[in-house]
Amino acid sequence: MNKELDDDDVFYGSGKSKAKKEPEKKSGVYGSEYKSSSSEPRQQEYSQPATDSQASEPERDIESEITETRREKAHAAEYHDIAVLRQRAAKHSAEAARLFKKYRFEEAAMVKYTQGANKARRKAEKYEQKAKDASAKADDKQANVQYLEGGKAERTRVKIAKLHAKSAKLKSKASSSMAHGAKLSQKAAAKREKAKAYHEQSKIEEAEAQNVNKRANKLQKTSS
């Protein structure tokens, strides 16, 4: 009766009458605490209604966007056509300038040949005049030789022969100068014809450039 009681007997009572521990509550796979702490907030999170910003977002007007895109595409095509026309006009202008430069070059050559021909003709005229003067002197001496006698008459006949030779030489030079002048005139005529052809082509290219620029200006005015 007076047996001493140990600490376990004092807390749990007598040996066999110790209080049984309460069995732990079995839970599912995730446990009861997962259901109470995790499952319910997630259900509330997914069940929340859409916010005001999501509900009030305006719908896109696709038809208007397509129309605007097509309009911009049409404008881009018009600008491309204008650029092509401007480029074509620039090419015609460049070709006109190139042909005009050739026209001026050929014209300068024509003027040079013309001046050379004129100079040759003037030289030929001088030779012709000198030849006439020499021939006239020879004729004068020939008229007076019959009145001379002896050695004086012979020396006069020699001078007459030399004057005729000089006249013939001057006439030959005059003929050569005239031939050279004629050749230069022919070259000048060819250069003139070539220059006029280049000038005509230059004017045609210039007119074409103006027409293309007018088309580009008209298209730009309608597109703006």
Image (cartoon, rainbow, N blue to C red):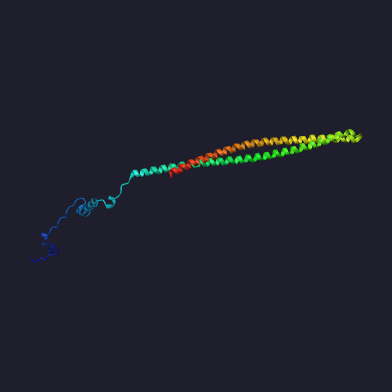
Q: Is residue 50 left or right of residue 22?
A: right
Q: Residue at x 73, y 39 (%)?
A: 122
Q: Position of residue 215 (x, y in %)?
A: 48, 40
Residue 207 visible here: yes
Choose between 55 and 16: the one closer to the eye.
55
Residue 74, quarter of picture: top left
**Extreme residue toward the right, this view:** 150
Q: Is residue 51 left or right of residue 89?
A: left
Choose between 215 and 93: the one closer to the eye.
215
Count of marks, rendered view: 0
Q: Quadrant of the C terminus?
A: top left
Residue 157 visible here: no
Q: Position of residue 195 (x, y in %)?
A: 61, 38
**Is the residue 27 above or below the residue 214 in the image?**
below
Q: Position of residue 10 (x, y in %)?
A: 12, 64
Q: Is residue 20 left or right of residue 71?
A: left
Choose between 53 and 22: the one closer to the eye.
53
Q: Quadrant of the N terminus?
A: bottom left
Q: Position of residue 71 (x, y in %)?
A: 39, 43
